[in-house]
Amino acid sequence: MNWFGQMPSNDRTDLLKNALKQGKTLREKHKYSERNVLQEISQDMSVETSKKGRKRKNNDETEEIEAEFINMHSDVQFLIKEYVAVSYQDNWYPGMVQKIAKDLKTLTVNFLARTNNTGHFIWPNRKDEQEVNTQFILSHGFMPDSKHCGRLWFISEHADITTSYEKFSKVFF
């Protein structure tokens, strides 16, 4: 930068003004290009998501099962400390109701964790508490049997709940 210091004052001022002006022009050009790239990406993403939409089978059996699950809990009053089985995309999980929202459509559930043995569950070391919409509840009112001093729990209704989950997941997931 020794050459810059040796320039006359007027030349330095002109050089800095031109550099500032050209820098602003270049930034505007890059912003415009960046905006175009982001718009293209957004359009590509919306096209991909619309293509990936899963088509459900619309047959009488599916509609019948869907109606059955939608109306299943419309008149049910859930209770605090009641056990429920909740459907998720990968599987169903049992838990105990901790809170009921004022709208009666959302429950706070403390979940049990699966073990390697079918129908057996344990309370996890870290509390797994989630808010759940009542439309995802497959079963309620069952009572797990305690095994090994309350650490291991067996749900005798697990086969029926699994059957319900399989029907539910075919329709909704």
Image (cartoon, grey):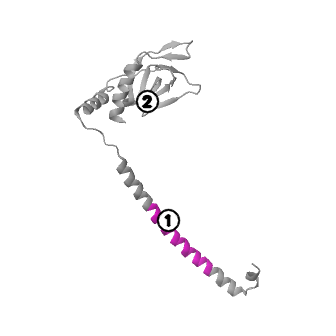
Image coordinates of residue 28 in percent, x first then y, are 52, 71
Q: Which residue is mark 2?
A: 91
Q: Which residues are magenta?
A: 18-39
Which structural element holds mark 2?
loop
Q: CA distance from mark 1 to mark 2?
A: 43 Å
User: Residue 84, image x and y in percent?
Assistant: 42, 22
**Magenta stretch holds residue 27:** yes
Count neighbours of disc 1 (C-alpha within 10 A) and say few if under 14, some if 14 to 19, many if 20 or more.
few
Three-letter amino acid code of the residue under disc 2: Asn
Q: Using the rendered image of the protein, determine whether residue 162 is visible from the camera's viewpoint.
A: yes
What residue is disc 1 on?
A: 34
Residue 13 horizontal side relative to residue 162, left or right: right
Tell me what residue is drawn at x 49 percent, y 31 percent. 130
The residue type indicated by label 1 comes to Glu
Percent position of residue 44, x then y: 41, 57
The answer to whether the residues at label 1 and label 2 have Cβ atoms under 8 Å apart is no
> Which quarter shows the C terminus?
top left
Q: Is residue 20 above or below residue 132?
A: below
